[in-house]
Amino acid sequence: MEQQPQSARNNNIGFTLIELIVVATIIGLLAGSGAVAYTQFSKQSRDAKRKADLEQIRAAIELYKTNSSANSYPTSIGDLSSCSLGALTDGTNTYLSKVPNDPKCTTSIYYYAPVDSSGGACDGTVSDPCVNYTLAATLERSSTVCQSLTTQCTSGTGCTYCVGPYGEK
């Protein structure tokens, strides 16, 4: 019987340790970059919802003022610190059947601050109408802080997106 050469007998079919490490590294890099992209996309979509919610609330507030006998903005739009908000109503008309809340309402909320002509608190009456307001949220992908509500927004970070009457930002 003829003997086979040593190299022919050890022809194992399989992967070397180096090849397995390279493949595992590539899979790890792809998974890591996918997770980062998903996180960024999630933040971006929550920020877009916040902006859309504030525009919806602003439209309801403007309609409220149009129908107000005192030509005043509402003094409040419900308990914004709650994750289950009520409606924006004047007792007769409903301007927003459910005030939307922040997508992460357990850690972040919307803010509404009406003011009278002197910039102070208002009661919405003919003698003390709310003539201006700021509606705000804290965006996850922005660091520019609005000046009008910095003390009321989440734990020292300040609001990063503010809107006011008539499309002002």
Image (spheres, helix red, strand yellow):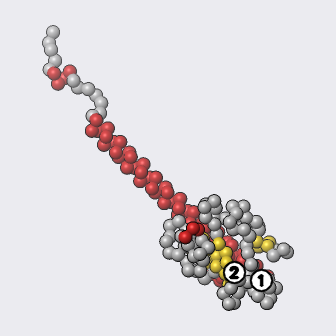
Residue that label 1 marks: 124
Identify the amino acid type marked 1: Gly
Q: Residue at x 49, y 55 (%)?
A: 38
> Circles 2 and 1: CB distance less than 8 Å?
yes
10 Å neighbourhood of mark 1: few (<14), some, or many (≥20)?
many
Under tag 1, what secondary structure? loop
Residue that protrudes farthest toward the right in the picture: 92
**In which quadrant of the rendered image does the N terminus lie?**
top left
Residue that protrudes farthest toward the top in the picture: 1
Under tag 2, what secondary structure? strand
How many numbered tags mark residues here? 2
Pick the front one: 26 or 88: 88
Q: In the visual, does 2 lie left or right of 32?
A: left
Q: Residue at x 61, y 73 (%)?
A: 152
Q: Earlier in the sequence, mark 2 or mark 1?
A: 2
Q: Position of residue 10 (x, y in %)?
A: 21, 24
Question: Is residue 103 at least partly visible in the picture?
Answer: no
| 79 vs 13: above or below | below
Q: In which quadrant of the rendered view does residue 4 lie?
A: top left
Q: In the visual, does 15 lie left or right of 44?
A: left
Residue 114 shows which numbered tag? 2
Q: Residue at x 68, y 85 (%)?
A: 120
10 Å neighbourhood of mark 2: few (<14), some, or many (≥20)?
many
Q: CA distance from mark 2 to mark 1?
A: 9 Å
Identify the amino acid type marked 2: Pro
Pick the front one: 158 or 8: 158
**In which quadrant of the rendered image does the C terminus lie?**
bottom right
Residue 32 shows which numbered tag? none
| 21 vs 115: above or below | above
